[in-house]
Amino acid sequence: MSIAHGIRTLGVLGSGQMGLGIALVSALRAKVPVLLHDRSADQLTKGLTFMDRLLEKDVAKGRISADDAKDARARVSVVGPEVGLKGLRDVDMVVEAVSESLSLKRSIFASLAAELRPGAILATNTSSISITKIAASAIPEGTGAASDAGKASAGRVVGLHFFNPVPVMKLVELISALQTTPDTLDRARAFAVACGKEVTTSKDVPGFVSNALLMPFINEACLCLNPLGTATRDDIDTTLKLGMNHPMGPLQLGAIGLDTCLAIQQTLYEGTRDSKYRPSVLLERMVDAQWYGKKNGKGFYEYK
Ligand code: CAA
């Protein structure tokens, strides 16, 4: 156990692209036992299959030994939908990585605050939702925001924002809610470092630093495509890739999930009431059509 973060067991909520990656780096790099929970048994199976593939590839490329891979995999156990959040009762920290819905996160954090022991850290991987709002939902029923119990419970909520693909991207953005205690921040930072990540900090503003800059960029690329018709999809992406050395063009970056991009852009727009963040109609229509990108095979590109 690392003294700096004191996390002996981690819970990860959501086994999509992000949750799976967080579970993997936690088990492989921070070497902590992980309980991975999802409300879909199918999604859990898919996630674990992908984790096995990533570990096998790391072994094949000589980055880790077969024993390291085996040990990391053995550290990950699943908590199925039939068990629910109570299966995470004994963890020292949870990282929530479910979809970008405030109401969903509110109900999850209210349940986590009730189920987990008082000292456990409640981290969210949200890309843009206010950590302060999420922390307010972790105040136990029957206590107020200003009570000692209310302050202590909301004070353990923190933003721990990983980047996609988590095993590859080196950054974690650390976001403090108004309520977050310094001890929670220190431990969350130490945990991210143990996962092999560099940490930057951001205030709790819509989109934090990362998405307040990235999402208008992706949105602007959508506007270039339609209605402006400035250039084709490929020319937009190639311009940014070859002209600015971006590893992916802005429309390719929609691989994060066009539904996620739209949800973040809407949070920026609603949170700032600034028209410069208004989502492009094309992005809205792509999501209306359920063309979410890599996660379901069709977005600006086709994914096999
Ligand atoms: N999970 C795990 N590993 C992955 C992966 C995934 N989903 N996708 C790619 N990789 C790995 C590949 O397996 C490969 O590993 P090896 O070196 O072991 O072969 C490595 O990444 C490089 O992949 P490729 O050679 O296939 O392709 P590439 O050189 O184009 O790199 C990339 C892929 C790392 C994703 C690169 O294109 C890139 O850096 N893209 C930009 C990513 C980015 O900007 N992410 C931030 C998104 S924003 C976000 O996440 C936050 C938010 O709030 C929305």
Image (tube, rainbow, N blue to C red):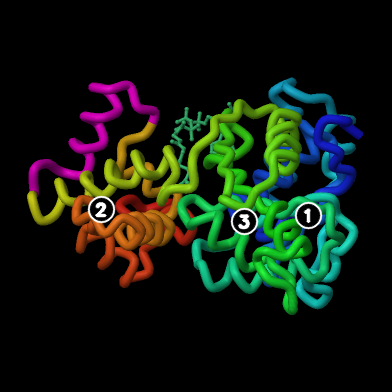
* Magenta span contains residue 234: yes
Q: Is residue 62 left or right of residue 225?
A: right
**Residue drawn at (86%, 38%) of the image:** 6
46 to the left or right of 114: left
Magenta stretch holds residue 59:
no
Front residue of 232/199: it is 199
Front in this rendered view, residue 159 or 66: 159
Q: Name which of mark 1 and mark 2 comes first in the sequence.
A: 1
* Position of residue 21 in the picture relative to residue 256 (left or right): right
- Disc 3 residue type (three-letter): Ala
* Figure check: 177 above or below 26: below
In the rendered image, residue 40, in percent from the top left (x then y), is placed at: 68, 71
- The residue at the point 32 percent across, 71 percent down is 289
The kind of residue on which mark 1 rests is: Gly
Residue 2, position as x, y percentages in the image? 87, 31
Quickly name the residue at label 1.
Answer: 11
For the point 58% across and 62% down, which residue is it?
134
Label 1 – label 2 distance at C-alpha:
34 Å
The answer to which image quadrant residue 90 occupies is: bottom right
Would you name the residue on which mark 2 appears?
277
Residue under label 3, please give it. 97
Q: Does residue 180 sit above or below 201 in this rendering?
A: below
Q: Secondary structure at mark 2?
A: helix
Range shown magenta: 229-247
